[in-house]
Image: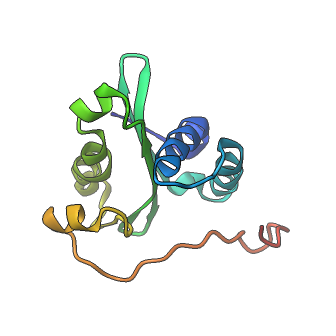
Amino acid sequence: IQEHRLRDRLAVVAETAVITQQHYGSTITVKRMTSALEAQAEWLDDASLVLQARHGNDTVGAALFFRHGDDLFLRTIGFDRSNVLTRNAFTYFNLAFYEPIARCAPLGIRRIWLGPGSLDTKIRRGARECSLFSAVLPPPGSGVRGR
């Protein structure tokens, strides 16, 4: 698993996120996801953390996090469930739990906010349930009025 910034792995994050979201019935396209991620990269790239799981030259999954203070927020995660490498490597667990936790202490991060998906799985691994939301707003002075 390699660590990157969003701007450097924007296409990988978009493609893997769309695969996962479409698996659950979303109609989002790679073009639309890429557009949303481009805005996030423009305004938040310094706070981004992309964990890219690879097997040889193949990407088997990617997770996008943003850091704010001593908190790390999972924004999106994606992988191809049909790929045998993804299942055998426990890609979801490594990207969502084990790798971020391993990186937290050296970075001074105290909490990881994982979002509402797979709630039972997260609770069985020690997470606590609480209200969580996210919004992406343009920074003051950017000249962008929102999308």
Which residue corresponds to the image point at 27% horizontal and 56% vertical from the top-left?
A: 104
Nearer to the camera, 36 or 44:
36
Residue at 38%, 32% in the rendered image: 82
Which residue appears at 29% of the width and 51% of the height?
100
Residue 79 versus residue 96: which sits nearer the camera?
A: 79
The residue under the point 80% across, 66% down is 142
Tag count: 0
Determine the residue located farthest toward the top in the rendered image. 56
* Left or right, 74 with reference to 137: left
Above or below 119: residue 47:
above
- Relative side of 37 to 92, left or right: right
Q: Residue furthest bottom?
A: 131
Residue 116 rendering spot, x and y as whole percentages: 37, 69
Residue 64 seen in the current view? no
In the image, 100: left or right of 14? Answer: left
Image location (x, y in percent) of residue 115 = 39, 67
Q: State the residue lying farthest toward the right.
A: 143
The answer to whether residue 21 is visible is: yes
Within the image, what quadrant is residue 125 found in?
Answer: bottom left
Colour pattern: rainbow
Which quadrant of the figure has residue 138?
bottom right
User: Measured from the top left, where is residue 143 in percent x and y?
Assistant: 85, 68
Query: Residue 141: x and y, percent?
Result: 80, 72
Which quarter of the rendered picture does the N terminus lie within?
top left
- Residue 84 drawn above or below residue 139: above
